[in-house]
Amino acid sequence: MAAAEVTTPKHPASGRTITVKVKRQRTPDAAAVTETFAIPYRPNMNITSVLGEIALNPTTTEGKGTTPIAYDANCLEEICGSCAMLINGKAMMACSALVDKLTGPDGNGAITLAPLSKFPVVRDLAVDRSVLFENLKRVKAWVPVDGTYDLGPAPRQFPQVQEQRYPLSNCISCTICMEVCPQFNDATGFVGAATIAQAKLFNMDPSGAVLKEERLRALAGGGGVQECSFAQNCVQACPKQLPLTEAISDMGRDVFVQQVKDFFRR
Amino acid sequence: MAAATPRIIVVGGGLAGLSAVIKIAEAGGKVDLFSIVPVKRSHSVCAQGGINAAKDLKGEGDSVLKHFDDTVYGGDFLANQTPVKNMTAQGPAIIDLLDRMGVPFNRTPEGLLDFRRFGGTLYQRTAFAGATTGQQLLYALDEQVRRHESEGKVTKYEGWEFLSAVLDDNGVCRGICAMDLRSMEVRTFPADAIIICTGGNGAIFGKSTNSVVCTGSAQSALYQQGAFYSNGEFIQVHPTAIPGEDKLRLMSESARGEGGRVWVPNDKHDKRAAQSIPEGDRWYFLEEKYPKYGNLVPRDIATREIFKVVYEDDRGIDGQPMVYLDVSHLSPERLNKLEGILEIYEKFVGDDPRKVPMKIFPGMHYTMGGLWVDFQQQTNIPGVFAAGEADYSIHGANRLGANSLLSCIYGGFVAGPEAMKYATSLPAQAGDGGHAAEKQRQTEFNSMLLNNPGTENPFKLWRELGETMTKHATIVRYNAGLDEADAKLVELLDRYRNVNLSDKSQWANTSFAFTRQLWNMLQLGRVIVKGARLRDESRGAHYKPAFEKRDDERFLKTTMAAFKDGAPEITYQEVDTQFITPRPRVYTST
């Protein structure tokens, strides 16, 4: 057999370069600066491979030596939710953002990279999105199982229920829905679409429904589902096509019904 | 006396780590969970096809013993049989538990769990949630851990990287040394026992199907501290990955489980579009050679056949190292069950696999080897446990598809309670248990790196490492090539001493953290290469053309690598074969 070679064949160098402008910030308190890089083009490049090229040779177009760019990334196949950032001003996952679709009609347009704008910057393109995980605690996004010992099978579930639950369970916690939401800001304290969708997911589970009322109460009032202004940005930007607006409107109705019930119970 | 409430540290928040955390929290222990990434972003999220358990809901007469036999046979008899037997026996209960936790498994019309067939078995034994099963399982466990966290039983240290174990004068583990990946602070944390659940080591091969964090760094650090690393040479190269610029993206075995077929045109320069090439002009080489298992032969076999078609028969598509994986003939219902992976292909390649056959090639995928553990998941360092892909148990010389999710959860479910048991009878430490010394050792390493005036770019060293390992230590291995690879690794370790960090700052310095991992990757690379070099036989994923046969007399043995004088020293240990007598592994006829 021939010598083992399990790598992609190298494409001939086309000589073309891609211009990438990166908004950088050394620390959470430092001022932001923009650095420009020229990267050798290869077919099928994505933004994470562009960032990898910069790490190999961290030199700006002015010839100034700089540092590799800090950013969050892990799976590189749009399932871990790490690498959300603003690419040409739009909130996207860097791994699935293909260079060929970002350099404009003539292929010479510069690509801009910036951190998500609604979350505290850690460094460069890395931001702190732990607010989402806190929100998931607030709505008790789990099934409170009795224990992990063998208690036999779960209740049966018709395929129709699974088909509704599965798309919601595909949320990768990338926070893009929160980034693009006009209502997600300090003034409203809105929890955002992802959290509301997870509350719906667990309310639909036969056993998870035991906490349904608690979840609905957590989503009532300030910062809750009522803050949504139905801009519908979330559903358009979601990289996993979650039915977010449907989830918000379903949960809005359930929260209202719960509030009425609670009112008459007083 | 031991503390009233055992304090356990779990490193890694994938399926194995989260499983261990849940068991400890349930048993009343206190857990500190360390992870480089938020645990919900761990690599288990990438698993696609499903999880095996012999629930026999398809009326086929499947049983846990058949699952046991398929796993041992699939692993070419290298796995110790006792843990495999235990794991397969627990499979059905684990699936039920996951179902109770709310995993959106696919269903039959009656509302029962649906099952699909995977490689290396003739039974429909794989439960699945679309083609994103790992994601759904990880989320279910993540949610349970979040619940325990909100009740104060679990403390998460996300964004912290494990550097080493803290060992006392008797070599007993007393905690860990870790680094905050934001402030770069190095600190030690006390624990009565630690559980290492840090996954595989794909990054050693440069490009693989693994996530960025899968460097094997933690396992390597422990190996350098005295832990045995076993069966390192057994690396699974998945037959169907999408070649890419930054990584190889997995195309799940479930594509074949749902009826996908692998083929090449009879004429490699056939100019017609793939979908318009008629049946008669296609070569379904797996189906032809393996009529019974067809496209669902085990991964090591499918990978070698694809490699052979491309490099020996020179039949790759258009002369390129690629073959077709075709699902375009499947019904919409079946395609629907594959949606998640078909989307990945469409997004990253640009073609719609529902209409056009996918172009795929094998890619480094899974680490069968790992930290040596006993049947209680404890390594040879007292108080250090390991579970999941990070340990060597269960899969032997080749892992069957959909067994990894099960082995991760099983391993965590054993390691958690066993660590608790160990911790409750642990005598109190003398002095500081080695904490100050370990912190100093790691801090010195850091300042050496930061003050090094060298010229080597760590990312370039890494690229050379990946190219060498992929060339010499994946599908086909030659002793001359392995010698060359080891010499290259020695050279890279030497050049590492001349490494230069372009970023010397002490805030969220990702290239600094990476450079630390690189040292460990290089050391572990040597373990893989040396184990392969000395194993003059072919078994499962380890294939040497010069030694085509399995040699049970010499090599039905676990490889044990120990770090001696800065290099791996290899010894061997007997394999537990008390239940199933080793027999030839032949998928063409059985």
Image (cartoon, coloured by chain):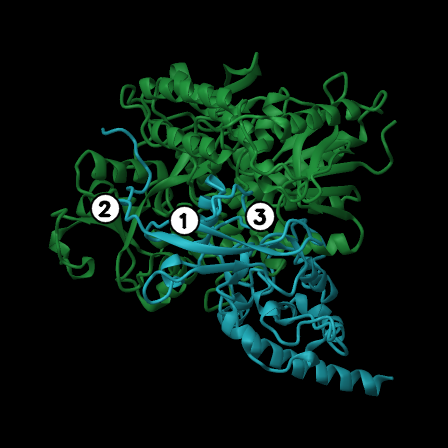
| Amino acid carrying mark 1 in the image | Ile
Q: Residue at x 57, y 13 (%)?
A: B564
Relative image position of residue B300 (x, y in whole percent):
35, 36
Q: Look at the numbered disc 3 and give the secondary structure of its residue.
A: loop
Same subunit under labels 2 and 1? no
Looking at the rendered image, the quarter that the C terminus of chain B falls into is top left
**Direction from residue B98 to residue B421 in the image, left or right:** right
Same subunit under labels 2 and 3? no
Q: The cyan chain is which one?
A: A
Q: Is residue B150 or residue A148 the one in the foreground?
A: B150
Q: Can residue B414 be seen in this view?
A: yes
Q: Residue B287 carries which label?
A: 2
Cα gap from disc 2 to disc 1, whole angstroms = 44 Å
Q: In which quarter of the image is residue A196?
A: bottom right
Looking at the rendered image, the quarter that the N terminus of chain B falls into is top right
- Judging by the rendered image, the residue that carries numbered circle 1 is A39
Q: Which residue is drawn at 66% across and 32% down?
A: B163
Same subunit under labels 1 and 3? yes
**Direction from residue B330 to residue B236 in the image, left or right:** right
Q: Look at the numbered disc 2 and give the secondary structure of its residue.
A: helix
Relative image position of residue B507 (x, y in whole percent):
67, 43
In the rendered image of the structure, the colour used to display chain B is green
Which class describes the residues within 10 Å of circle 1: few (<14), some (14-19), or many (20+)?
A: some
| Amino acid carrying mark 3 in the image | Ala
| Amino acid carrying mark 2 in the image | Glu
Cα gap from disc 2 to disc 3, whole angstroms = 47 Å
Foreground tag (2 vs 3): 3
Q: Disc 2, disc 1: CB below 8 Å?
A: no
Report how many numbered discs are placed on residues in the image: 3
- Judging by the rendered image, the residue that carries numbered circle 3 is A70
